[in-house]
Image: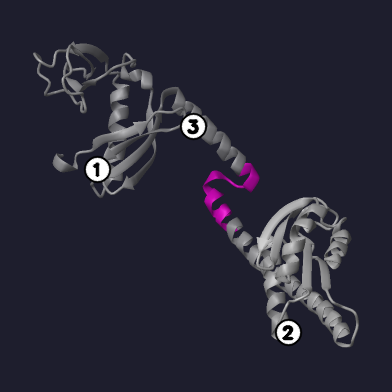
């Protein structure tokens, strides 16, 4: 009533649940809308007629017509449709420019699926009726049965079962994260050991002008390669002041029997810049990077790894 009266704002009619937007500032709007749903279904069961008639806005009384946004300067008669009651009065009269059902019984039933506030003063009501409602209910029942089968539970147990599975998933992800951290530490030590051996050879007068280390990290994906790269850089720079003359090429992101996956080249910025695109080409892939890092995907990351290493040695 008054300023709090629900006023149509817009809507959408589709083959899925349709919706209508209403301007409503009441705090208890859900209760009000559910009362409307019950009232509408009562009127559908009463099989009220929907009768078209024409009105001349210049001559007829328009006070009972619930319509807005008619264009200014309109001429001629306006088509209306009235929803009548059994005692002869009308419960609604509105402008109508197209097809409508002859009586409310054609709607069979209406159901409000979801009620939500989309703006401070606007609520959205999702609904369906008639054959569309039957199709939606049938689809929902079919989906519910499929979920019951997958989860091995009854419908009332679905939420609890899903919450339990999500909790188990989070715990497994946490355990997997700890495992991957340990794997990263193992690979890090492997890379650092190789770097230290090469550096010692250089310090002892050996002809080691460039250090190229290759590493297959198995199923570790790109985010974990990045973490591994950060660990290696942090540990190595703590022992040496520079990555000059050093490049590390990692491949992985897939089971070791597969040849497609990710590659990550890091180290001396000049060598990485010169060799990045060539590595991608040799590994049958593509990638990009800067500042001593080059990453991408390739279709021959394992079968062509040694060839990529030889190319890097020749830079």
**Which mark is nearer the camera, 2 or 3?**
2
Q: Is residue 254 in sight in this rendering?
A: no
- Say which residue appears at 32% left-offset and 28% top-offset: 41
Q: Position of residue 43 (x, y in %)?
A: 28, 25
Q: Nearer the viewer, residue 114 or 249?
A: 249
Q: Which of marks 1 and 3 precedes in the sequence?
A: 1
State if disc 3 and disc 2 touch (CB < 8 Å). Answer: no
Query: Where does the N terminus fall, quadrant-wise?
Result: top left
Q: Nearer the viewer, residue 120 or 113?
A: 120
Q: Nearer the viewer's eye, disc 3 or disc 1?
A: 1
Lower position in the chain sequence, tag 2 or tag 1? 1
Foreground label between 2 and 1: 2
The secondary element bearing badge 3 is classed as helix
Q: Majority secondary structure of the magenta segment? A: helix
Q: Is residue 169 left or right of residue 80?
A: right
Q: Is residue 242 above or below residue 217?
A: below
Element marked by disc 1: loop
Residue 24's disc number: 1
Residue 277 can be seen, yes or no: yes
- Percent coordinates x, y for residue 140 in the rendering: 52, 35
Which stretch appears magenta? 148-164
The first of marks 2 and 3 along the sequence is 3
Q: On the image, numbered disc 3 is attached to which residue?
A: 137
Q: Residue 130 colored magenta?
A: no
* Image location (x, y in percent) of residue 242: 72, 80
């Amino acid at each position: 009533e008054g300023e709090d009266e629900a006023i149509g704002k817009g809507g959408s009619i589709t083959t899925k649940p349709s919706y209508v937007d209403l301007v409503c500032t009441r705090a208890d709007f859900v209760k009000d809308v559910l009362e409307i749903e019950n009232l509408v279904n009562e009127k559908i069961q009463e099989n009220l007629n929907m009768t078209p008639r024409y009105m001349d806005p210049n001559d007829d009384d328009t006070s009972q017509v619930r319509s807005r946004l008619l264009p200014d300067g309109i001429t001629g008669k306006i088509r209306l449709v009235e929803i009548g009651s059994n005692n002869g009065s009308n419960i609604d009269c509105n402008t109508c420019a197209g097809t409508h059902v002859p009586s409310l019984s054609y709607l069979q039933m209406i159901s409000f699926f979801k009620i939500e506030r989309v703006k401070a003063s606007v609520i959205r009501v999702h609904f369906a009726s008639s054959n569309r409602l039957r199709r939606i209910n049938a689809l929902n029942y079919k989906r519910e049965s499929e979920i019951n089968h997958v989860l091995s539970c009854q419908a009332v147990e679905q939420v609890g079962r899903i919450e339990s599975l999500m909790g188990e998933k989070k715990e497994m992800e946490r355990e997997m994260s700890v495992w991957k951290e340990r794997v990263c530490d193992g690979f890090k030590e492997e890379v650092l050991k190789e770097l230290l051996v090469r550096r010692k050879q250089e310090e002892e007068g050996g002809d080691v002008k460039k250090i190229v280390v290759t590493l297959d990290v198995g199923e570790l994906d790109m985010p974990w390669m990045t973490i591994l790269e950060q660990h290696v850089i942090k540990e190595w720079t703590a022992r040496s002041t520079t990555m000059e003359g050093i490049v590390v090429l990692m491949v992985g992101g897939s089971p070791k029997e597969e040849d497609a996956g990710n590659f990550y080249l890091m180290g001396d910025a000049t060598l990485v810049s010169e060799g990045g695109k060539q590595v991608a080409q040799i590994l049958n892939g593509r990638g990009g990077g800067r500042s001593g890092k080059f990453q991408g995907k390739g279709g021959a990351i394992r079968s062509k790894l040694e060839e990529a290493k030889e190319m890097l040695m020749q830079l």
